[in-house]
Structure formats: C-alpha cells, structure tokens
Amino acid sequence: MELITSAANRYVKLARSLKERSWREKRGLYLIEGIHLLEEARQAGIPLEVVLYSPQILAAPRGEQLVAGLQEAGYRCLAVTEELMQAISTTVTPPGVVAIAPFQASSLTRLLSRPSPLLMVAAGLQDPGNLGTIWRTALGAGATGLILTRGSVDPFNPKVVRAAMGATFKLPVVSGVEPATLVRELEACGIKLVVADVGAPLVFWQADLRPPLALAVGSENHGPGRELLAAATARVGIPMVGPVESLNAAVAAALLLYEALRQRQDFCR
C-alpha cells in the first residue's frame, strides 16, 4: 500500500479546496465524509472521483470492508497520513475516509415535470444543519424534490451533507432559483404553493396539502420572502400554545411534510 505523505499531492489539494463553496461550484465537486455516508453513496450508485482514507480505518471490519468494496468496484482509493486526513476533513474528529464526488445534476423543469410532485422549498435558508435535516425529512415523507431559492446555503456544504444523512444521494435538489421564476413555473405547471407563515389564520392541517404541491418554509430571521407569500395558494401557520413565537425551520417543514403525507395516504385509500 502506497502512502501519500505530501500536502502537494493533487488529490489532497483538490479535497482541501472543496471546503470552500467557490471551489465546489467552480469544479462541480463536493466532499463525502465518513463510513456511513460512503456506504449510502455506494448503495445509491453515486460516482466517486477518488477516495482518500487513513490506514487506521482498515483496523475496523466495517472500514476494511468499505475500502475493499470500493477498490473491487474500480474506484481509485488512496491512503494518506493521519495529518493529511486531518487537513482534508471538515470535522473536528476526522472520520478516516473522504471521497470526492460530482454534483448530482437536476433542473427545475425536471422536478416540476415529475408525476404528482411534492416539492419542498427552502426559501433563503442559511443554516446548514436545518437544510440537511429538511432534506432528510423530505425524503422520508415521500417528497419528490428539494428546491432552494437564491440566498440559501450551498446544498453541498459538508455540514448539509452530513445532516442529510444520505438524502443528498437520493432526493434531487435544485439551488439558486429566483423566487419570481419559481412562482411562474409553479403556476404554469398547475402546482399549488403552500407557504408557512407565522401568524397565518389558516392552520396547516386545515389546508389542502395533496399533490401537486410545493411546500415552502423560510429562514427564522427573514421568513419565506414577499414574492412567495404574495403568490401562495395558501399561507399556513403552526399553532403555538406556549409562549413561543415560532418553530425551527426544520421542525416546521417536518410538520407540513408529514401532514401532506397523511392527507395523501387518506386520499389514496
């Protein structure tokens, strides 16, 4: 086993550059870190440019099985020193294995043209943990796509990828969408837009959340934005019994998504 020891190695330099959004967008590549996420990526058939691993990971059966399986599948797997793994990783405790993968390309047109679309819209959401949680929840609730409006956090931010727990590989995403463009395209496709809005008179379970549907939540600081609110088929609120002004965006999204799932299942019976 050849061990890479130089920070000047081209794959090490590439991996380190992908910590920054500008380089991810320039190269169309992002990082997948850790055994679990790489197992999920392999299961989903995600192509990998290169896999960098620390030899220590081979001491664990699961790590050895992962690296051996990736090598057998024809992926380029390169061993690096612990110091280089520390420099590559975006976590305080490096997971021992990091892969570089290309963005999974999708488009707004493709998402809107899916049969019975249930779309989750994150409007200007900037917290990576919230977005990753929403992505994971949307997949679990049977959503068909995730749409991020302009100003949202990069969906391939390492913190988003970790929080999504594999949803990155299974639920298509489109980012940087202008709200006006989204509104126009939703209307053209006959897709309802239901927007979570603090103080809205309609409680979310009173709204028709059956597909075709786009559910929108905004950031806790700025909300979903005037354009989406003005174009909404319905604005829905979440009742607060205790002295709380609003809920975390990921929690709000989960409530809407699972109410949509409940209504869809009732409708299909």
Image (cartoon, rainbow, N blue to C red):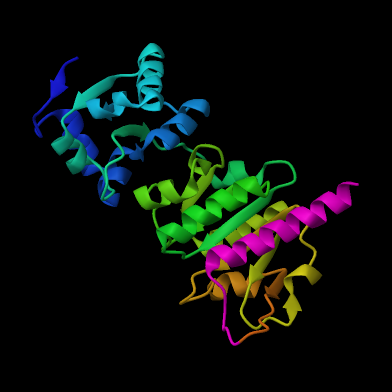
Query: What residue do we see at 61% from left, 44% from top?
Result: 111
Look at the magenta stretch and give its main secondary structure: helix
Check the image and report above or below for 113 versus 267. Answer: above
Q: Is residue 123 visible?
A: yes
Q: Is residue 86 left or right of residue 228?
A: left
Identify which residue is drawn at 25% across, 45% down: 23
> Which segment did they paint magenta?
243-269
Q: Quadrant of residue 9?
A: top left
In the image, is 202 to the left or to the right of 37? right
Residue at image location 57% in from the left, 83% down from the top: 244
Q: In which quadrant will I find the N terminus? A: top left
Residue 50 appears in which quarter of the rendering?
top left
246, 193: nearer the viewer = 246
Note whether residue 177 is visible.
no
Question: Where 118 sits versus 88, above or below?
Answer: below
Queried whether the magenta region covers residue 228, the answer comes back as no
Give x and y (percent) for residue 120. 60, 55
Q: Residue 164: horizontal and vertical position, in percent?
A: 48, 48
